[in-house]
Image (tube, helix red, strand yellow):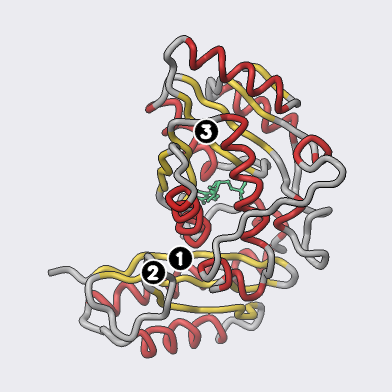
Amino acid sequence: MRIILKAAEMREAVREERSRGRRMGFVPTMGFLHEGHLSLVRESVRRTDVTVVSIFVNPTQFSPKEDFKDYPRDTDRDTQILKDEEVDYLFLPDSEEMYPGGFKTYVEVHDLQDKLCGLSRPGHFRGVCTVVLKLFHVISPDIAFFGQKDAQQAIILKRMVHDLDLEVRIEVMPIVREKDGLALSSRNTYLKPEEREAALVLSKSLEEARREVANGERDPEQLIRRMKGMITAEPLARIDYVAIVDRTNLDPVTSIEKEALAALAVFFGNVRLIDNTILQVKE
Ligand code: AMP
């Protein structure tokens, strides 16, 4: 695996791979890798000729009050993991490389960026879109792999790719969970044992919503009330949002017809966790 720190060098390597007719797969991450990330990496290795993984904790997607400085990092461990996965390139730029002095250009996906996580994290998706577009320009992947864990992010990035006529195809892979249901996240490492236990209420409440839909419930208000009830019963949990929305425009649905996205964000102490599921009505 070749480790590249500079965008110009990465671009050159990509040019060379492309000149040999190789199809490029790309997995952008913020590192501190876990099996969720690796499910994307493995899919890329399986489906493309050359896999590039980037690790960059992107400062522009954190607000000043958020955990940019404390975000978990372990580049040595990540490097070894990616070598073992037979990744071809690790792109590891620093902030100066991605945002040299005088940087002033940002990408916004209006409307979609202001809902759900965007409400409590203003500027977050602007930062995500900007860095992902920059990374796409450096790596020009044929396919880029993202996780359904960040459902809103995937929807917004698909919109960006469509609106800006990018050639990359976005693939969204299912949420990888611990055996007990907790969705894997780099931030789980910051949960105290009692918070880790309490956080199970997220997947349980989503599971309950799915069960109720299977039993015929079609009223999102009812489902949200039920989920909020379960989460509030957990003293260590503090709800940011619980929502049931349309999968394309992220607007709240008034009734569950065919399918809808149930998404939530909940704090445990200072740690904000997100999770989601697709509610499907079986014919
Ligand atoms: P991050 O390092 O948190 O920016 O995540 C990098 C990519 O991994 C994003 O596309 C995430 O959606 C994806 N990802 C993170 N956690 C999971 C998970 N538990 N299951 C599947 N994909 C995930």
Q: Do the residues under discs 1 and 2 have CB atoms within 8 angstroms?
A: yes
Packing grade of label 3 (10 A; few <14, some 14-19, many >=20) is many
- At horizontal 45% and vertical 56% (from top left) the residue drawn is 159
Which amino acid, by three-letter code, is at mark 3?
A: Phe
Dot 1 or dot 2, earlier in sequence:
2
Which percent across, then down, holds residue 184? 55, 52
236 relative to 225 in the view: left or right: right
Vertical side of 233 occupied by 90: above or below = above
Q: Identify the mark at residue 276; answer none if there is no mark.
A: 1
Residue furthest to the left in view is: 283
> How far apart are the alpha carbons under marks 3 and 2?
26 Å
Q: Which residue is mark 3?
A: 26
- At horizontal 44% and vertical 35% (from top left) the residue drawn is 143
Circle 1 or circle 2, nearest the eye: 2
Packing grade of label 2 (10 A; few <14, some 14-19, many >=20) is many
Which amino acid, by three-letter code, is at mark 1?
A: Asn
Dot 3 or dot 1, earlier in sequence:
3
**The N terminus is located in which quarter?**
top right
Residue furthest to the right in view is: 101
Q: Identify the mark at residue 261; answer none if there is no mark.
A: 2
